Amino acid sequence: MTTISADTIPAIGRAEAERLARTEYERVADQLRALTPADWLAPTECPLWNVRAMAGHTVGMMSDFTSLRRVMRRMSSAAKAAKAVGGPMVDSMTALQVAEFADHSADELVGCIDATGPKTAHWRVTAPWLLRRMPIKEEVGGQPETWRGAYLLDVILTRDPWMHRADIARATNTELDLRPEHDGRIVADVVAEWGRRHGRPFDLVLTGPAGGHFVSGEGGADGDRGETYELDAVEFCRIVSGRAQGSGLLTQEVPF
């Protein structure tokens, strides 16, 4: 396994962001297409969502990010809903997405992903400058922070369906399709951001098709690499996303 310096992992640019998004949407559709009727009713680790609701959220998020008008309309509706019920706007946004597609059949949801995926992937990286520069207030690990719209468009909107694929695989006890050139790149980007966020040296071995050996910094004159970890790549992402418990540097959350 080649050792990779996490400090040198390049950021995801627009062209790569579109390619990763297109592939991810294809993988989501393939996963859902293979599910049984019983699988669609399985509860997931996301409270109040079964597999079907999670698919509705994914379709809704994809549909929202196909035009500036749709994005702004959804954000406006979500802001009003959040003000009425309390809680983060993103929770109201996802609830509205699930409700909008609640009456769609499984085949219709998969068809929406097939039809919308390429359009969404392209629009996300060609969205108006105003949206890409727009500040977005979020919380990560209970701490408020401000993102630029480009971070949401290029990175988060691909991490989100990727993590939900993992959620659905766990909920249905099915195998998760993982490949180094796609999933490994997404995981490496998460590792790089995790390292930047905590700023400490580490030696991290992630196993599985999406994994790798990542190091960052040196903890002293003896060449100590700081905290060391070895775990499955998807489990690492589950931990830093807040879905599972971690210790040490693994308590540093990364947004998905």
Image: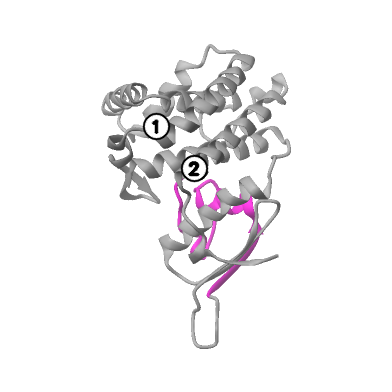
**In this view, the mark in front (2 or 1):** 2
Residue occupying image coordinates x 34% and y 40%: 149
> What amino acid is at disc 2?
Ala
Residue identified by numbered label 1:
91
| Other-residue count near label 1 (Cα within 10 Å), few / some / many at <14 / 14–19 / ≥20 | some
What x and y, as percent, mark residue 235?
62, 51
Helix, strand or loop at disc 1? helix
Range of magenta residues: 226-255
- Is residue 62 inside the magenta stretch? no
| Residue 161 sits above or below residue 117 on the image | below
| Residue 124 sits above or below residue 112 on the image | below
What x and y, as percent, mark residue 65?
42, 28
What x and y, as percent, mark residue 222?
54, 87
Q: Is 24 on the left or on the right of 38, as rendered?
A: left
Q: Quadrant of the N terminus?
A: bottom right
Residue identified by numbered label 2:
15
Q: For residue 224, what is the image quadrant?
A: bottom right
Cα separation between marks 2 and 1 = 29 Å
Mark 2 in CB contact with mark 1 (< 8 angstroms): no
Residue occupying image coordinates x 32% and y 33%: 128
